[in-house]
Image (tube, rainbow, N blue to C red):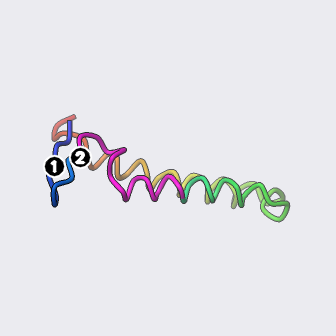
Amino acid sequence: MLKVNLYMATIEKFEDLEVWQKARELCKLVHKYTLNYSFAKDFSLKDQIKRSSGSVMDNIAEACLPAGV
């Protein structure tokens, strides 16, 4: 469990991190925009963009894991 006290803010899980919350918002926006017709025709581009936006959240969460997990 991640416990960090930065400027009086206690972080107990990665979902509490503002950067992770912003990454989630970005991921939702990317999903919304890839529903657009121009993206719908290019499956590989659409999938790559969606995977990369989700990867940002994954990388933040992975960095919060305890060492050795």
- In this figure, which residue is indicated by the disc labeled 2? 11
Q: Earlier in the sequence, mark 1 or mark 2?
A: 1
Q: Position of residue 14 (x, y in %)?
A: 32, 45
Q: Position of residue 8 (x, y in %)?
A: 16, 55
11 part of magenta stretch: no
18 part of magenta stretch: yes
Magenta stretch: dominant SS? helix
Q: Dots 1 and 2: beta carbons under 8 Å?
A: yes
Residue drawn at the location 50% of the way across and 52% of the way down = 24
- At mark 2, the secondary structure is strand
Q: Please identify the residue farthest to the front as the structure is shown.
A: 8
- In this figure, which residue is indicated by the disc labeled 1? 4
Q: Position of residue 16 (x, y in %)?
A: 33, 47
Q: Please identify the residue farthest to the bottom as the structure is shown.
A: 38
User: What range of the chain is rendered magenta?
Assistant: 12-25
- Measured along the vertical axis of the image, is residue 1 above or below residue 57? above
- Kindly indicate the quadrant of the structure image that contains residue 15: top left
- At mark 1, the secondary structure is strand
Q: Give, as a three-letter code, the residue at label 2.
A: Ile
Q: Give, as a three-letter code, the residue at label 1.
A: Val
- Measured along the vertical axis of the image, is residue 10 above or below residue 33? above
Residue 27 numbered mark, or none: none
Q: Quadrant of the C terminus?
A: top left
- Measured along the vertical axis of the image, is residue 38 above or below residue 64? below
